[in-house]
Image (spheres, rainbow, N blue to C red):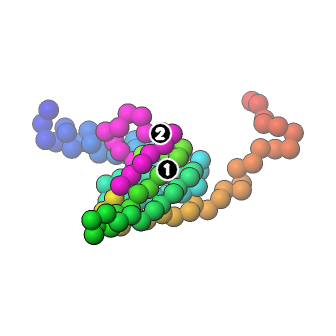
Amino acid sequence: MSGDELENYEAEMELQLYREYRDVVGLFRYVVETERRFYLANSVDLKARSEGGEVFFEILLEDAWVWDIYRTARFVKRVRVLSFKDVNVEELPQRDDLQLPQDGPALG
């Protein structure tokens, strides 16, 4: 595989990952960024820890999706992440417009 083919392959994988993210982001409450990964999750527990004078963060995520093009299973039930760098947690706006009609789902 040439360098150009590898670059094209990685660009296509990144585009597919972005499309998947766009499709699933509405299913989650939080966005979590660490120095190594980007996550979507429905439950986030972030704790600052200290050991031997070093401060680090322990993040426990439940019902999560992981942004990683090399991972085949991006949906995970529980994730425990340790980070010695900054962690960003944002709550996503709730999408109230995604409600089923009063009389149930429409079947076509």
Q: Quadrant of the C terminus?
A: top right
Residue 82 appears in view: yes
Q: Nearer the viewer, residue 2 or 21?
A: 21
Residue 100 placement (x, y as % from top left):
77, 44
Comparing labels 1 and 2, the label whose residue is closer to the camera: 1
Q: Residue furthest front?
A: 52
Residue 28 image label:
none
Q: Nearer the viewer, residue 32 or 68?
A: 32
Q: Which residues make up the magenta segment?
A: 67-82
- Residue that carries the numbered disc 1 in the rendered image: 61
Q: Residue at x 35, y 37 (%)?
A: 71
Residue 51 placement (x, y as % from top left):
31, 63
Q: Amino acid at mark 1?
A: Leu
Q: Nearer the viewer, residue 4 or 28?
A: 28
Side of 67 relative to 70 (left or right): right
Q: CA distance from mark 1 to mark 2?
A: 9 Å
**Callout 2 secondary element:** strand
- Any magenta on residue 76? yes
Quick one: label 1 or label 2, which is nearer the N terminus?
A: 1
Q: Residue furthest top?
A: 108
- Residue 40 vertical position relative to residue 106 in the rendered view, above or below: below
Q: Quadrant of the N terminus?
A: top left
Q: Nearer the viewer, residue 27 or 16?
A: 27
Q: Residue furthest right?
A: 103
Residue 76 image label:
2
Residue 24 placement (x, y as % from top left):
54, 45
Q: Residue at x 51, y 57 (%)?
A: 45
How many neighbours does mark 1 have within 10 angstroms: few (below 14), some (14-19), or many (20 or more)?
Answer: many
Residue 61 placement (x, y as % from top left):
49, 50
